Image (cartoon, grey):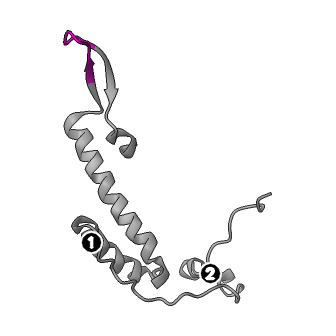
Amino acid sequence: MGQRGPRPTPTEQLRLRGSPRANRNTGEPQPPKERPPRPEWLSDEAAEAWDQLIPRLEQMGVLSVVDGNAIARYVELWVEWQQALAFVRKHGSTYPIKDGNGKVKSLGQFPQVASVH
């Protein structure tokens, strides 16, 4: 059975909000606040998104070295989503399915639509 109620707000977020509760949890893990290395396997577009996102997270004080893998997945999926959205905007969300005589019998949905919505 799951836990009751919402998950506790991380101490750093409480501190950024100026909450008096920020000093209550002294046993919370404190990962090192340093920039994770950008993975070499990122696509060029994802690397560009990484370079835009990382400084903002550092400035907010919420970036840790352990966030690297999650951010890498996020920027790669962001690029895939943008590509799918561009495809749907250009081609629409459906394509005609024709019978042997060339007559349209139904419409099929492009697979990219699932990524966009």
Label 1 Cα neighbours within 10 Å, binned few <14 / some 14-19 / many ≥20: some
Q: Quadrant of the C terminus?
A: top left
Label placed on residue 11: 2
Q: CA distance from mark 2 to mark 1?
A: 30 Å
Residue 73 belongs to the span the image colors magenta: no
Instruction: Determine the residue positioned at 44% across, 73% down.
Output: 69
Q: At 45% across and 81% down in the image, what residue appears? A: 63
Count all numbered tags in the image, as a single digit.
2
Give the label, 2 or 1, closer to the camera: 1
- Judge by depth and name the residue closer to the eye, 62 or 101: 101
> Residue extending furthest right?
1
The magenta region covers 96-104
Residue found at x 58% / y 83%: 15
Residue 84: % across, % down: 29, 47
Give the amino acid at mark 1. Answer: Ala
Q: Is residue 24 visible?
A: yes
Closer to the camera, 54 or 94? 94
Q: Is residue 64 visible?
A: no
- In the drawing, does residue 16 fall left or right of residue 59? right
- Residue that numbered label 1 is attached to: 47
Question: Residue at the front extreme?
Answer: 100
Q: Could you tell whether 10 is left or right of 114 in the image?
A: right
Q: Residues within 10 Å of mark 2 (few under 14, many from 20)?
A: some
Element carrying mark 2 = helix
Quadrant in which residue 88 is drawn: top left
